[in-house]
Image (tube, rainbow, N blue to C red):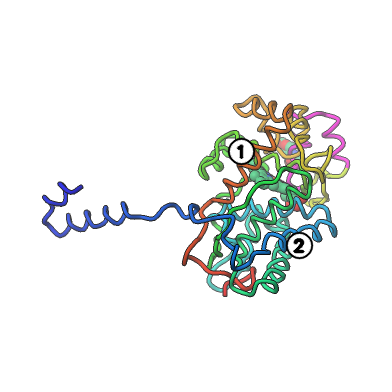
Amino acid sequence: MAAGAASCLRPWCMGLVALAVLLAAAPFPASAQLSVSFYANTCPSVFDTVRAGVRSAINRETRMGASLIRLVFHDCFVNGCDASVLLDDTGSFVGEKTARGNQNSLRGTNVIDSIKAQVDRVCGAGIVSCADIVVIAARDSVVELGGQSYSVPVGRRDARTASLAAANNDLPSPFEELADIRGKFSRKGFNDRELVALSGSHTVGFAQCRTFRPRIYNDTNIDPAFAALRQANCPSAAGSGDGNLAPLDAQSPNRFGNNYFQALVNRRGLLHSDQVLFNGGVTDSIVTSYSNDPSSFNTDFANAMVKMGNLGPLTGTQGEIRTDCKRVN
Ligand code: HEM
Ligand SMILES: *[C@@H]1O[C@H](CO)[C@@H](O)[C@H](O)[C@H]1NC(C)=O
């Protein structure tokens, strides 16, 4: 570059050199600034406070653990883990709560709001971000439901905007095929193993009839007894019983484990998007191995969750620390 600069005398060329110098001096990726000890001085009790809030929410309603695990996915996959998913619509933007994957489906935002209020009572306002609370709460939910723990680096800041279009574009749908789902995960930097491990979240929680109706009536790669069982509480006519719930993992919807993968091997995946992971394609062998080996699933899941938490965080002076997770300051 020095030789290039020496022979570069015209203004347009010097501009290019200046740009190259700026790019070369660009800081490390923002995730390098996240650290487990970020709040060690400013809010040392943040992890205890979030865990207590998650525990009491799960004690009130067990399903909330699953809902909080889903919430971090829907935040982090849309413009990074910046709590954009929590923002209500405003005059200047339409937020993510009405995106196809969120409307009448996203849960747990009120739990985050109340944990945030508690954290601010303990540590003062303007210290801990909503984005960090979402990521910590998901980890605590995994642990509370019996999954393996992992460390959560923190120091994220909150977005000042949200994007309905990005949410519609980046969140996978239960009606998608494997190629589309792989594309969505690979665009966020996840390989097949990580995709399958993260999908193992469906070891807990519930889905509404409207999300699995075509599967239980029209898919052929489904155990017939399982299809009949689910049809009993999910009528075939669109609009009837749309919100009726079924467990994503029939064996143990409140227990974090590898039963989900055993169900897939037995063609008992609830969502079409679940069963495509074991339907003769490239991810079959990963599903089989997790179905046989809970410890490799637990380890891979924990690592993939940390990686998901590192997606595009705002750090330093970017964004803000929201006071109310539902709106910008
Ligand atoms: C692979 C693509 C995925 C698709 C298509 C998908 C789709 C869905 C759908 C349709 C539901 C039911 C929502 C409802 O009926 O209201 C659901 C629930 C859930 N999803 Fe996913 N999901 C995917 C991946 C993930 C990932 C990566 C995670 C977390 C890391 C996750 C965690 C959950 C959890 C825990 C629930 C249960 C929520 C509750 O009971 O409140 N999902 N998912
Ligand atoms: C099943 O497929 C048929 C033919 O494409 C369609 O008319 C029907 O609506 C589908 N049923 C469900 C429940 O998706």
Answer yes or no: do the residues labelled 1 and 2 have beta carbons within 8 Å?
no
What is the quadrant of the C terminus in the image?
bottom right
Rendered image: mark on residue 53? 2
Above-or-below relation of 301 to 120: above
Is tag 1's residue or tag 2's residue first in the polypeptide sequence?
2
Residue 96 visible somewhere in the drawing: no
Disc 1 or disc 2, which is closer to the eye? Answer: 2
Q: Quadrant of residue 71?
A: bottom right
Name the disc covering residue 195, or none: 1
Bounds of the magenta segment = 210-232
Left or right? Give the position of 184 relative to 206.
Answer: left
Q: Is mark 1 within 8 Å of ligand 1?
A: yes
The amino acid on which the numbered mark 1 sits, given as a three-letter code, is Leu
In the image, 54 versus 259, the foreground residue is 54
Q: Could you say where residue 40 lies in the image, as x and y percent from the top left?
A: 60, 62
Helix, strand or loop for disc 2: helix
Residue at point 83%, 40% (across, down): 252
Q: Which mark is residue 226?
A: none
Q: Is 225 inside the magenta-drawn segment? A: yes
Q: Nearer the viewer, residue 57 or 196?
A: 57
Spatial CA distance of label 1 from label 2 is: 29 Å
Q: Position of residue 237 (x, y in %)?
A: 80, 46
Above or below, comparing residue 56 to residue 202 in the picture: below
- Where residue 128 sits in the image (x, y, percent)? 61, 66
Q: Residues within 10 Å of mark 1 (few under 14, many from 20)?
A: many
From what the image shows, is residue 122 above or below residue 60? below
Marks counted in the figure total: 2
